[in-house]
Amino acid sequence: MKPSGEDQAAPAAPWEECFQAAVQLALRAGQIIRKALTEEKRVSTKTSAADLVTETDHLVEDLIISELRERFPSHRSPFSLVHV
């Protein structure tokens, strides 16, 4: 006879949900970047002429930040420290 609960699956590690979210976002970001490779680029600069930023960079950054904030609202956000 098995002890109670032994046939149930073990709970996922606490970081598993975060890991899965990161993988999903990386795949989505990759799709956006792959599509952008065939399109005309709009380039701007950040802090110097050598610090180039594309519209795709902004799009991917916005996707990742907004999705993480939505999925994990209680997590501390280092994104508020980012100066774009």
Image (cartoon, rainbow, N blue to C red):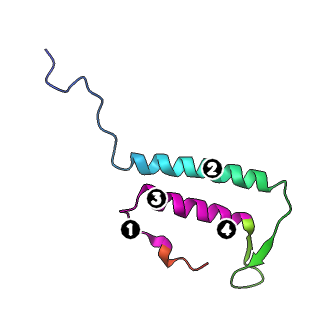
Residue span colored magenta = 56-79
Residue at image mark 4 = 58
Cα–Cα gap, marks 1 and 3 = 12 Å
SS assignment at label 1 = loop
Q: Position of residue 51 (x, y in %)?
A: 72, 78
Q: Residue shown at 30%/29% (left/top)?
A: 9
Q: Identify residue type, mark 1.
A: Arg
14 vs 45, left or right, is left
Q: Quadrant of residue 49?
A: bottom right
Cα–Cα gap, marks 4 and 3 = 18 Å
SS assignment at label 2 = helix
Mark 3 closeness class: few <14, some 14–19, many ≥20 residues within 10 Å: few
Residue at image mark 1 = 76
Is 29 included in the stretch rendered in magenta?
A: no
Cα–Cα gap, marks 4 and 2 = 14 Å
Q: Residue shown at 67%/68% (left/top)?
A: 58
The earlier-in-sequence mark between 2 and 3 is 2
SS assignment at label 3 = helix
Q: Identify residue type, mark 3.
A: Glu
Q: Residue furthest bottom?
A: 48
